[in-house]
Amino acid sequence: MSAVESYATKLVRNRMGLWLFVISDAFVFVGLFIARMVLLGDTRPHLDQGLGLGVTIMLLISSFFMNRAEVEMAHGNRPAFLRNIFITMALGVIFLVGVVGVEWQIAHFGPADGQQGAVFYAMTGFHAFHVLTGVIFLFIVWNNGRRGHYSAEKHWAVEACAIYWHFVDVVWMFFYVGLYLLGTPIV
Amino acid sequence: MRFFSTSMFRGLIAQVAGTVLGMGLAMALRVVFGLPLSSPIEAEDAHIREVIVVVGVLVGAIAFLVGSGVFTDWFKWARGEETSDDHTPDPSKPNWMRYFSVDFDHKVIGVQYGVTSLLLLLFGGIFAMLFRIELSGSGITFLNSEIFKVLLGYDGPHLYNTLMSLHGIVMIAGILLGVGAMSNYLVPMLIGANDMAFPRLNAFAFWINVPGAAILLSSLFFGGFDTGWVGYPPLSLRAPLGMQMFLIGVYLVGLSSIAGSINVIVTTLTMRAKGMSLFRMPIFCWAALATALLQFSATQLIGLSFQLVMLERLMGMSFFDSLQGGDPVLYQHLFWFYSHPAVYVFILPGLGVISELLPVFGRKPLYGYRWVALSSFGIAVVSFFVWAHHMFVSGMSPFLRIPFMYSTLLVAVPTGVKFFSWAATIWQGKTIFKTPMLFALGAVVIFLLGGVTGPPLATIATDLHLHDTWFVVGHFHDTMFGGFIFPFVAAIFYWFPKMSGRMYNEKQGKIQFWLMFIGFMLMSNLQLILGLLGMRRRVVDFDAALGFDTMQLALTIGGFMVFFGMLLFAYNIIRSWTKGEVAEGNVWDSRSPEWQKPNPMPLHNYEQPFEVVGEPYDYGLPNSRYVNMNPAGGSPSAH
Amino acid sequence: MADNTESRRAALNRGVWVALMLAVLTFGEFLVGVIAPPWGTLLLVVAAFKAFFVITEYMHIGRLFSSDEEH
C-alpha cells in the first residue's frame, strides 16, 4: 500500500463512512418517532396545516435542486452547480424560518405544556438542528465551489453534502406525517 | 516545560476558559431576553443556576476540542485548504509528547485510549473502595466522616448513592475506552493496514473523551447524583446539578463510541491485506466488527434518552414525568435499547482476545474458527432483542415478558459456542502458563460464572425474586471481569512488547493474577450469596440482625485484593515501559503478522504489504503459514 | 441505478421525475391526513415510498456497492 492512497480508494471508504453515520443518526430520529407514538398515540399536536405543507414543499424542492447541483458538478458545469446549490441553501433557510421562526411562535402551546409540547418541540428541534448544520455544510461547499474547488472527477464534498441534505429531507418526510397528519388533533 | 505546548494542556485551559465564557454568555442572553439571573425561591434559583452551568459546560467541551487542535484539519478543509496525509512526527520533539498531543497514528491513539481507560478504572476503583469500607459492617460510620462534608458539601447516604452511581458509570466509561484502545491499537495491525480509515475522526473520537471524563467526574463536586448509573426518571429529574454533569459526560463518551465504531467498520471492511478474506481475519477483528456494529447503532438511543432528560430538566418538557403526562417506562425502553447491547460491547472484544490468546499459548489450532467468528455476530444480533429483560418489574405490559425471556435465554447459544471452542482449544494442548495466558484462562473461568448466573435472572419467575438484589451485582461483576477486565489485562501484557519494545515483569504479573483471581472469587461469590439471602443492592446500610457483617467484611477484603492487584499492574507497566528487559522479535512465537515485525512496531506498520497465504490459527500443523511477509521477492511459501 | 456515466440530460430528467413523484405523494398524504385521519398506517407506507425514492435516486445508495466507478 502506497503512502498516499488514490482518490478512488478513499472515495469508497468515505462513502461507506458517511452512510454509516447517516444510519447511526437515523436511530436518533427513530427513537424520537417511537417517543411520539408512545406519548401521543393516535392524537397529534394542534398545528397550522397550511404552514406544515408549505415548509414540507420547501424542503422537498430543495432536495430536487440539491440533486441538480450534484449532477451539474459531476458533468463539470460549474455555474449551474453554484446556482442550484445556492437555491438549495435559500430553501433550507426558508424551511428553518418557517419552522423555528413562525411555527414555534404561533403554536398554541410551549415546550413545557404537556406531552404535545414536549414531542413537537423535541422533534422539530432535533430536525431543525440538522437542517442548520446542513445549511452550514451547503454554505461551505458553495463557498469553496465559488473559489474553483471541485471538478467533475473529484467532488466528494459535494456528494457528501447532497447525501446529508437528502437524509435530512427523508427524516422530515416521516416527521411531517408524525406531527401533522397522523391521528386526530388535540384540541 | 514542553508539556504546556501539548494538546492536552491547551485543551484543558481552553475548556476552563470556554466554561467561564459559556456561563457568561448564558447570563448575557438571559439579561437580553429579560429573564432573571436569580430568584428568591430556592428551587427556581437552583434551576436558573443549572441552565447557566449546563450552557457553560457544553461550550467548555467544544472549547476543549478547538483548543486541543482536533478540529484544525477539518477547519482547513472547510476553508478549502488541502492537508497532508503524511503523519510522520516532528523529530525535534521528544517521543512522549506525541502521547499528549493530537496524533493521527492509530498506535498512539490506541495507547492514549488505554491509559485514559486505566485512569478511569482507577477512579472507579477508588469510588468502589470508599463505599466498600462503609459496607464492611452494619451502621453508617465511615461516610459520615467530617472530611467528606468539608470536601464535597454532603455525606452519609447521599454520598453513598453518589459514589455507587459514579462507580458504575465511570467504570463503564473506562471500559468503553478500553474497548476503543483494543480496537484502535489492534485492528489495523492485525489486518495489515497502516492506519485507520479516518485518522482525524479517530483522533476526535479519542479527544472528546477527555472533556467528557472531566465533566463526568466533576459531578462529584456539583452535589452528586443518586440515581445509580441508569439515571431513571422521575428520580433523575429531581436529582442535584451533578445529574446534568453525568448526562453530558456520558453523552460525550457516547459520541466517541459512535465515531470510533464507524472507523472500525470501514477499516475492517476495506483495508484488509491481500488474501485476507473475511474468514481468514484474526478472530479479534470479528469481535471488533460485531462490537462496532452494536456501538454505531444502539449508542444513539442512550444519547437521545439522556438528551431528553436534560431537556426535561432544563425546559420542563414532559417526556418522562407521569405527573405531566410523560411516561417513565419510555425512558427505560430507550435506555436499555442501548444499555443492554452495551454490555456486549464491553465483553465481545474481550472474548475475542481470549480466542486470540488461547491458540498461541496452547500451541494448537483454534477450534471451530468459523463458528467462533459467527458467534460474535450471533451475540450482537440477539442482543438487540433482549433489552426489556431489565424491566420485568417495571410495570410494562406483562405479556411482553415472555418473548424477552426466551430471546434472553437464546444468548446462551452463541456464548456457549465460544465456551466449547475455548475448552476444545486448550484440550490436550502443550500449554505455556505465561501471565497473559493465566489471565485468559482466569477470564474463561470467571465468565463461566457470569454465564451460569445469567439464566436465573433471565427467567421471569426467579428474576422477580432476585431483581434488585446483590445477585444481580454479582452476576454483572462476573461478566465484566471475565469479559473485559481480565482479557484487557491479558491483552496489555501480551502486546506490551509491541507498544514499548520491552517485556513486563513476569513475576509481578503472576502475583497480580493470583491476587486478583482469588480476591475476585471471594468478592463475587459473596455478592451472589448475599443476594440470594436477600441483600438489596444500592443501599448504604443493612440490619445487623441479618448476620451479614462477616460476609460483608470478607467481601471488602476481596475487593481490596482486586484493587491492589490493579495497582501492582499499573506499577508493573509504568516501570517496565522504560526499565523492562528489551523484547526482541517474536516473543510469543505467534503466527500473526505484527509479531513478524520488530518491537516496538515501526512507525508505518507495514512499509511493504504482506500477503495472507493460509489459515490464521493452525498452530502445531507442519508446513503451514499464515502470512508471507515478503510476497514480491521472498522465498516461495511452503504450503 | 443512477451514476455519472449517464448523460447530463438524462440525469436531470430523472431528478425531475422523482420530484414529481414526491409532489404527488405528498399532496396525497396531505389530503388523507386532513380528511381521513384514521389511515395512519397508509400514511407511513407512503412516507416510506417517498423515502425509498430519495434514497435510491437522490442519495444514490447503489454507489455504495459499486466498486468500478467512473471517477
Image (cartoon, coloured by chain):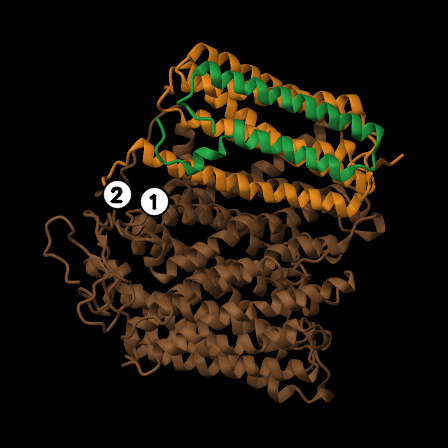
Chain colours: A orange, B brown, C green
* Residue B17 shows in the view: no
Mark 1 lies on residue:
B103
Image quadrant occupied by the N terminus of chain A: top left
Q: Amino acid at mark 2?
A: Pro
Q: Residue at x 69, y 55 (%)?
A: B333
Location of residue B299 in the rendering, given as x and y in whole percent from the top left corner: 56, 51
Q: Is residue B338 above or below residue B148?
A: above
| Residue C31 image-quadrant placement | top right
* Residue contact between numbered discs 2 and 1, judged by CB atoms under 8 Å: yes
Location of residue B282 in the rendering, given as x and y in whole percent from the top left corner: 33, 60
| Residue B623 image-quadrant placement | bottom left
Q: Is residue B250 above or below residue C6?
A: below
Specify the subunit that label 1 lies on: B
Q: Amino acid at mark 1?
A: Asp
Q: Residue at x 25, y 45 (%)?
A: B93
Q: Residue at x 64, y 87 (%)?
A: B549
Q: Say few, some or many: other residues with alpha carbon within 10 Å of mark 1 (under 14 / 14 to 19 / 20 or more).
A: many
The secondary structure type at the circle numbered 1 is loop
Q: Which mark is residue B89?
A: 2
